[in-house]
Image (cartoon, rainbow, N blue to C red):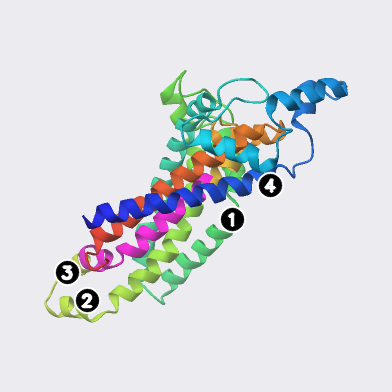
Amino acid sequence: MKVLRVVGSCLLSAIPTLILATLIVFMLQRLIPGDPAVAIAGEYATPENLARIREELGLNEPLLAQYLSWIGNAFTGNLGTSFQTGESISALVMQRLPLTLILTTMALFVAVAVGLPTGVIAAQKVDTSFDRFLTTGATFGIAIPNFWLGMMLIIVFALNLGWFPGPGGVSLQDDPAQAIKGLVLPALALGLVGGAEICRQVRSAMVESLSTDYVRTHRAKGLSNRNIVWKHALKNSSLPFATIIGLQVSRLIGGAVVVEAVFGLSGIGSLAVEATNQRDYGVIQAVVFVAAVIVLLTNLIVDVSYRLLDPRIS
């Protein structure tokens, strides 16, 4: 029942969060220079033709009326049609979304695989040269932009060594295996930066756990260091770890916009960039809406995991 209350509370709070996020983006994109009607009809279109297009698209309505109409449809699953192509935006998003989800999942796996063990090892060797080396490397990793790291990975592993496909590549529908292989470098570009942050956070949490009285008691009882670190201390650090995982998901989705552009991938990140260049407001709003839903669902999973990891949390 406690978990159900948490789920219900999170779902209720998600609605105003979704509304606020989409409202801010809705208003900000109106500040983008250019007119969707001009983008559709061309620079030499007549004023009458431009007025007709604005009327058909509903751009003559007040901004609040446009937003309320859009958000009402979005909650029913109707994301509208693209200004540029006339296609269903829901179909466009569902076509691009799987690639972004796979990329984000692979990047999160890389981040955890790199950050968790290095953070635990650094905590065991706190204040040693090895610890300083790892934490310094993690600091540099956090500071490195993922798009720059992506370009370096392309130069070394795609162009020079030829181990992985370069930018572009095949789609998931045409050749899933080759498409997944083409996601390895983008996942590394996203995940290594996230792994550096996880390393720092896990180290801090583990240093605190390893200095507690119950760990000293376990050592006095003769438990092996491996058992103490990986079974007891790491479990006590699970809440900060769950928190940073939740934050990483939102950051990875945001970073996917840039990384997909660098690697020429057809995900929702590149869809948002294309829509911005074409002033396709409906597509931009749909991408933000879907991304916000994913982040909110992730936060819901993290909140529920808190209760499962520590029953003392009410």
Front residue (pair 98, 205): 98
Q: Which residue is mark 2?
A: 215
Q: Which residue is mark 4?
A: 28
- Element on which disc 3 rests: loop
- Element on which disc 1 rests: loop
Instruction: Identify which amino acid the numbered label 2 is placed on.
Output: Val
State which mark lies toward you, 3 or 4.
4
Residue 14 seen: yes
Q: Which residues are magenta?
A: 229-253
- Element on which disc 4 rests: helix
Query: Few, some or many C-alpha atoms within 10 Å of disc 3 (few <14, some 14-19, many ≥20)?
Result: few
State which mark lies toward you, 3 or 1.
1
Question: Where 183 sits versus 301, above or below?
Answer: above
Residue extending furthest top?
Answer: 174
Sequence-wise, the earlier of marks 2 and 1 is 1
For this view, does 311 lie left or right of residue 142? left
Could you give the CA–CA distance between mark 1 and mark 4, rounded to whole angstroms? 28 Å
Sequence-wise, the earlier of marks 3 and 4 is 4
State which mark lies toward you, 2 or 4.
4
Question: Where 309 sits versus 106, above or below?
Answer: below
Question: Where 48 sits versus 124, above or below?
Answer: above
Residue extending furthest left?
Answer: 221
